[in-house]
Image (cartoon, grey):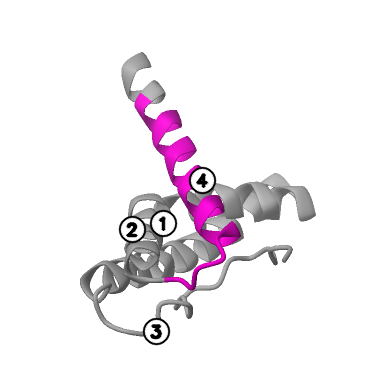
Amino acid sequence: MKKLLVVFVLCLFVFSSASSFAADSKYPAGPIQKLERGVGNTAFGWSEIPKRIVDETKASNPVKGLIWGTLQGTGKAFARTASGVSEVVTFPLGKYDKPKVLPDMATEK
């Protein structure tokens, strides 16, 4: 179990480093960045469920957070995972800078 946690944390670090490097790059987004984004969304789309539960619990109460957060998270997780799969399948094709699912927080440029 400990090894699995270490691998998970390392994967998060690698994906966050790669995506921040791609965002800071002077070069336009390309197929590799589209593939990275797709793999990240496919692998971590499920993480929307606990995130939405926590967000909704903080905004209202634990019961509403558990019920409504689970429903919201499931919908968002499905969208993010489906978007990731489509980006992995179509990464060699055009429109590299237009992700299908936008991040919740705006990035600074």
Q: State which mark lies toward you, 2 or 3.
A: 3
- Circle 3 — which element? loop
Three-letter amino acid code at disc 1?
A: Gly
Q: What is the crowding at mark 4: few (fewer than 14 residues within 10 Å), some, or many (at least 20)? A: few
Residue 62 x/y as whole percent: 69, 45
What residue is pinned by disc 2?
A: 42
Q: Which label sits on residue 16?
A: 4
Q: Say above or below: 81 vs 28.
A: above
Quarter of the rendering occupied by the C terminus: bottom right
Q: CA distance from mark 2 to mark 4?
A: 15 Å
Residue 65 x/y as whole percent: 65, 52
Q: Nearer the viewer, residue 99 or 50?
A: 99
Q: Main secondary structure of the magenta part?
A: helix
Three-letter amino acid code at disc 2?
A: Thr
What residue is pinned by disc 3?
A: 95
- Extreme residue toward the top, this view: 2
Find out whether residue 40 is within the magenta segment: no
